[in-house]
Amino acid sequence: MSVETPTRPDRPGGHVSLAEKAPNARRREGASRLMTVVLGFTVAAAIVPLVLLLWQVLANGLPALSLDFITQVEPLSYRERGGGYLHGIVGTLYMTGVAAVVVIPVGVLAAIFLTEYGGSKYAYVVRFFTDVMTGTPSVFVGLAVYALLVSGAGGAGLGFGTLAGAAALGILMLPIVVRSSEEMLRLVPEDLKNASYGLGARKWQTALKVTLPAAAPGITTGAILAVARGAGETAPLILTALGAREVVGALWGAPQADIGLLMVDGFTQPFDAGIERAWAGGFTLIVIVLLLSIIARLIASRSQAR
Amino acid sequence: MSATDTSTTKESLRGSGRARRADPIFRGLVLVAATSVLVVLAAMIIRTTLDAWPVFDAMGFWGFISGQQWSVGHSRSEVTGTYGAFPFIYGTLKISFFAILAAVPLAIGIALFINEIAPAWLKRPLASTVELLAMVPSVVYALVGIYFFRLYIWEPVGQFIASSPLGNLTFFGPPVLLSSYWSAANILAIMILPIITAICRESFAQVPRDEVNAAYAMGATRWEVMRKVIVPRSFSGIVGGTMLGLGRALGETIAIAFLIGASQRWAPQLFFGGDAMTSVIVNTFADAAPEAIWALLAIGVTLFLITTIVNVLARLIVYRVGQFSGDAAL
Amino acid sequence: MEQPRTATEPDVPASAEPRDDAAPAAQGGMPEARIDDAVFDIAGLTVRYGSFTAVRDISMRVPRHDITALIGPSGCGKSTLLRSLNRMNDLIPIASTEGRVLYNGEDIYADWVDPVEVRRRIGMVFQKPNPFPKSIYDNVAFGPKLNGFKGNMDDLVEESLRRAALWDEVSGKLKDSGLSLSGGQQQRLCIARAIAVSPDVILMDEPCSALDPIATLKIEDLMRDMKEDYTIVIVTHNMQQAARVSDYTAFFTVDVDDEKGERTGDLVEFDTTERIFTQASDQRTEDYITGRFG
């Protein structure tokens, strides 16, 4: 340990050993250690609920899961076991799909506007309100779509259904697509664009044939994450899709089913069979959302590796 | 625009008319796409406000937000019921406040741990795990909240607090219900943890490494560097993250709807059932007569107003701190 | 105070370490200046970042109350070496250190040593001026407050600023932000901040690279004044600066391994600055120095 005893605390001659710490060193070191443990506990406070949640969903969802669950519709009575959420799965994918098909191109084009013409005041306004829209409560979007599309009084009068549900999900996805795409487009090096301009390409050619492909993996990642978020939404669909008891193909005119809506119907009834199916539905929903986000992250990491 | 556009002296440099028109067309196309965001937002605001107007008109805006009685009428054309949204506004603010109170310190701690303490190989997995909390659909939180958390954790903890000396205060007093402000606040805290953590992590990461090193080089311990350099430096980021979390909390619907009690009343206690703005909308929508739907739209408009103010403030703060990546904005 | 300014002077027997430890440094035909009172006695120091070796097998003794300059082409590991002298490299998760760094005879990498204590004794000034976004006063008081300084803080702040030759310029505006100062003043503030915790050694990592010539001269003057009280080790890109301020100079070179694509720093020569610049014993040193000068 310490090699020598200091003869005087000042410099030259006998030096102060490193073991001779500042007077408050022990307390400070203790505080640092203690806080490391405390901060570790905060991480545990986030992980424990997550583990409990996943465990509950697995433990309660798996028993009710079978091939029937994804190939059959729910029996008419919540008391009856068996059957499945086929109509909900179809409805969720249908509405999310319609929303994605419309919203992703619009969102990416808007993002191109924000990057290519981003200096203008108008671009600033668009960017700002896009961010405001990100924080809009989903239930407000549901209400608004109800008032705009579903309701006959003052609205388009389409009634509850696929299109109204898709509109609500699309409005929730749009700002995410715009902002994440913008972020990715911005990462494209200026040199690459200049090279294209140098070859005599016009702005639209450069934007669509150089910038966009270069940013494509990142944009895809953002878009898939937005879709995942849409797929997990339930609240706005209560006000727009309403729910159905069979597979619905109509774009409008008939209420549409959704996994989340079926779950709500199931777990608010006091019947074990319905509650079990709700757990299985929760499991399915998590699997869908996780699959989407894993795909998104794979695309992101593969493009980074290149 | 590109150089060829500006050169008009030589005919050969003009380019064909079609080719030169392509850029303005392209510009128009992306402009329309960008404008669609504003149009959608404006359409939503105008339509809902118009539909909600009869209720605001009948109750007065102040009467609507301060009124304590909510008894719906059944008319198709006029406002016959009494619509006082105070119980819902109170509930929303109460559970959001307590969710923030729990989530912000946790988020700061988690962000510090991941950024400053965790070994390099552990950072990514920990961050992904916290992000996973954000990916879980709200309806699943509702399900697990109803059938697990409130039964085995929140209610027992509530009972413990209510039977402790704290229980003498009205606020912490019994009875402890399964569905209560307390349960709703708890689920909210878990749900908003990821976004606050993400913003905190980003702003901690933006603290110049030079300053951190300078503090270390003066003999600061790791905790001192965090407390005296990193956290103070990131104050506005933390505030911005808190506001974004608050915005989330105010708007959260499904998980709240089945955990707060849906009583359509307010209560001063923490462990008692109440109601919130979002929950009354989804819980009563199915049976609502047209005039009740106007009233729900009025709640929706009020909610939008509150969340938008919170979000705009949050964005202004976060913008000032610096650019944040899309992931965090989620 | 009488200090062993030149290597030939007899010294106070300071370090308990025997001279043998310096012996490896003399291997490889490298003549070494006689340094009797060494603050640092580095032996076989290798620093790796992951699998990449940044510096390899460095052995040298750093004299007390002198200015030692570390020079060499970029990528030669001189900053890495500097950062390993107060364990700043510990903050890089993938960094690993081998060999010994004796500070007053104690290995700073020994298990029992607290890196916080090491850094309190061995301060550092960085390449870019990096004052905290606090007032000038609070910048200087930051370290002493951490260390539980009980005396008169105002006096300590003034004393530190005086030693950093900044007092006259800022005495009237101690409450102003440290960031309101010019680049050169900011760097002197950083020096004052380092001085305030009364370190033994001050490591400077290219302290003037972000400054204009006049500010640079001020810092160099300051360094010469400071060596009365402190041992200074400075990394610099600037040959003239090394020649102007330092008493000893260590020249490093880059060893490029084309097969692995690695660049590793090697110590070529360590001697008094005068000898390095006039009669370098290694051809590489001379090439580098004359290349820069000529």
Image: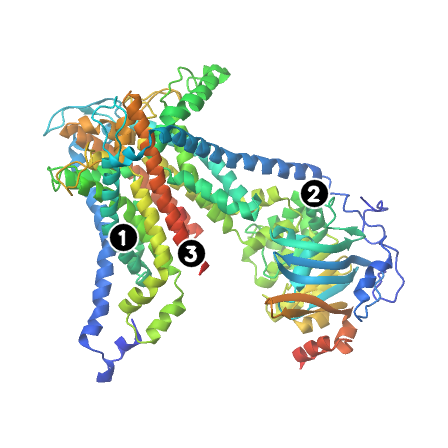
Marking on residue B176: none
Question: Is label 2 or label 1 in front?
Answer: 1
Identity of the residue drawn at 31% across and 63% down = A116
* Picture coordinates of residue B298, whole percent (x, y): 22, 33
Question: Is label 3 or label 1 in front?
Answer: 3
Q: Tell how many labels.
A: 3
Judging by the rendered image, the residue that carries numbered circle 2 is C149
User: Could you tell me which secondary element the residue under label 1 belongs to?
Assistant: helix
Judging by the rendered image, the residue that carries numbered circle 3 is A302
Q: 10 Å neighbourhood of mark 3: few (<14), some, or many (≥20)? A: few
Q: 10 Å neighbourhood of mark 1: few (<14), some, or many (≥20)? A: many
- Alpha carbon distance from label 2 to label 3: 53 Å
Chain ID, mark 3: A
The amino acid type found where label 1 is placed reads: Ile
Q: Are labels 2 and 3 on one chain? A: no
Q: Taking A130 as reference, is B286 above or below it?
A: above
Identity of the residue drawn at 27% across and 56% down = A110
User: Could you tell me which secondary element the residue under label 3 belongs to?
Assistant: helix
- Alpha carbon distance from label 3 to label 1: 21 Å
Q: Taking A100 as reference, is C64 above or below it?
A: below
Image quadrant in which you'd find residue A275:
top left
Marking on residue A104: 1
The amino acid type found where label 3 is placed reads: Arg
Q: Residue furthest front?
A: A67
Image quadrant in which you'd find residue A187:
bottom left
